[in-house]
Image: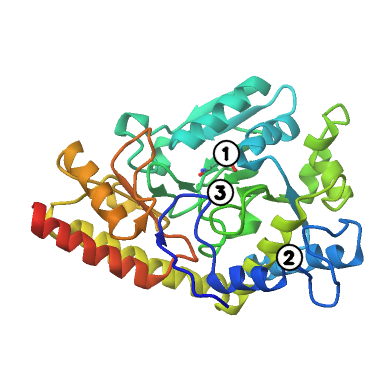
Amino acid sequence: MTTVHRVYNFAAGPAVLPLPVLEEIQRDLLALPGVGMSILEISHRSKTFEAILERAEADIRTLAGVPSNYRVLFLQGGASTQFSMVPMNLLTPGTTADYVDTGSWALKAIKEAQKVGTVNVTGSTKADNYSRIPAPSEMTFTPGAAYVHITSNNTIEGTEWKMLPDAGGAPLVNDTSSDMFSRPIDIARHGLIYAGAQKNMGPAGLTIVIVREDLLQRSQKSLPTMLNYAVQAENKSLYNTPPAFAVYALGLVMKWLVAQGGLDAIAKVNERKAAILYGEIDRTGFYRGTAQKESRSLMNVTFRLATEDLEKLFIKESTAAGFDGLKGHRAVGGMRASIYNAFPEEGVNALVGFMKEFERTHG
Ligand code: PMP
């Protein structure tokens, strides 16, 4: 195999994938072992693809401890399509859905739900620039709500829920796009979980939905077929042609995760990586973390410098030094280091080394 140069990729998504996964894809791209065809060429109705899909689901179930009364769906359209599908399926007429407003993506979910039905926005931290997750005392849930929607990790603002809220019996719906399978998750406390795959789980083009079976009864026959959870579940995610390559690649990432020791083990690595980076941010005051400490994300580490000019210089010099994707989201500015499961610890140490040197020369 030729030696290729890979930079440290801090992008928020699509993001870095485990090297062994990329190598396996490269090795088997022309012909899957024993099949003689590429994953890009095989029928989604073939036994081979069926086995790939089943294996991916089995690994997801093992990793996350998915109870048997939950269905795992492989859908398309990204997490953004879930912003619409969730209310279309679950927000039945005459009911209210509660949404917690913790950032730009939460707000997008709210806007889509408002097109479908009645939404109660509870516990917004907008007044604090979304620098934290609201405390339980700041959220008032609607009695008998159709569901309560949260965003477990706020990719742009760099905050995460450390504990799930008590939704008072309403199904909890969680957009876990940027932290799915980065730490253990209590599926049984949720009604539905969704995530675009392109951060922690695989390439873009695939969305994972884990939904409690009884909620499928809410899906009305009048819904567009492709947007109906019950139809997707009945057809085992094969109502139409799924993105076979993305399912295959996600399956390899799940296999890699199992080999790492599962979610408890990867969470320890993620905690360690984030602690190294936040430790450097907090060391002198030259860097300023934008999220409040108790809400800091372990996946997206957001920080600023004293001036925008200095930030521009940081981006320029870090890029030249082989670090990619550190520019913060255009909506908030500053810097963001996304350190998902597959991001190597030595890359975090290398960034800290660069940050120390940048402070020494520009501080
Ligand atoms: N929710 C969150 C928390 C996200 O980070 C993103 C993507 N960055 C989305 C939703 C939208 O995902 P997609 O691009 O898959 O529609």
Residue 352 locus on image (x, y percent): 25, 64
Check contact, mark 2 vs mark 1: CB within 8 A: no
Residue 169 seen in the figure: no
Q: Are marks 2 and 3 in contact (CB under 8 Å)?
A: no
Colouring rule applied to residues: rainbow
Find residue 113 and report its horizontal and vertical position in percent. 62, 27
* Nearer the camera: disc 2 or disc 1: 2
Image x and y of residue 50, in percent: 86, 63
Residue occupied by mark 1: 149
Label 2 sits on residue: 56
Q: Which residue is mark 3?
A: 177
Q: Visible in this render: residue 52?
A: yes
Sequence-wise, the earlier of marks 2 and 1 is: 2
Q: Residue at x 35, y 63 (%)?
A: 274
**The N terminus: image quadrant:** bottom right
Work out whether 146 lies above or below 25: above
Q: Secondary structure at mark 1?
A: strand
Determine if the C-beta at disc 3 is less than 8 A from ligand 1: yes
Q: Quadrant of ligand 1?
A: top right
Question: Which residue appears at 41% of the width and 42% of the height?
Answer: 156
